[in-house]
Image (tube, rainbow, N blue to C red):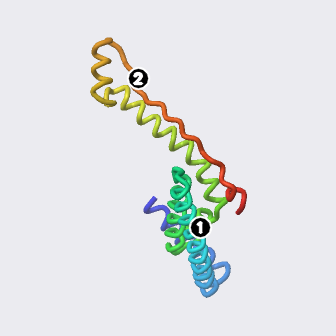
Amino acid sequence: MFVAVPIIELLLVIEVGSAIGAGWTVALLIADSVLGAWLLRREGARAWRQFRDALAAGRWPGDEVAHGALVLVGGTLLLTPGFLTDVVGFVLLLRGGRRLVLAIARPRLVASRWARWAARSASGATGSDAAQRRSQTGGDVLDIEVVEIERESRDDDTRD
């Protein structure tokens, strides 16, 4: 990733430069950086405001933290010169883009976390109580705690 992305960025800048000229290419990179900085400021302030509102309302701010993290990643990508990172950065700064990324990533992250937990559970790394019960019963014991989290629907999710 650290090798491929800069090479792709360099090739894209060369291609765009040969198509529209070096001056226009530099102007385009500067313009998308300025637009990205403005968007980062706006979306960062919105994410911070929603985080504070969630805390004030006594809600778990999980979605707000995820949106804030994606805004930071998007802003960082916009600081990197190049067209590929700018496109990804803009996607992460736009609210609809963040929703799409979270909709794709959340099930994978949850499944990944579940798989790691299950592997630790199967290897006996869940704690001394489970290991003691396993040795007493002669079989595997699945030691789990069920926690239910209800998400509240936010009215501002419908606005973009």
Residue nearest the observer in this picture, 106 or 55:
55
Residue 20: horizontal and vertical position, in percent?
67, 81
Between marks 1 and 2, how big is the CA–CA gap? 42 Å
SS label for mark 1: helix
Task: Name the residue at the top extreme.
Answer: 137
Q: Could you tell me which secondary element the residue under label 2 belongs to?
A: loop
Q: Which residue is mark 2?
A: 142
* Residue 37 occupies quadrant: bottom right
Residue 100 location (% of width, % of height): 64, 53
Looking at the picture, tell me which residue is in the foreground, 155 or 139.
155
**Residue 136 as seen in the image, left or right of residue 142:** left
Q: Nearer the viewer, residue 17 or 27?
A: 27
Q: Residue at x 60, y 77 (%)?
A: 38
Q: Residue type at mark 2?
A: Leu
Tell me the tag on residue 46.
1
Above-or-below relation of 136 to 37: above
Q: Position of residue 7 (x, y in %)?
A: 49, 67
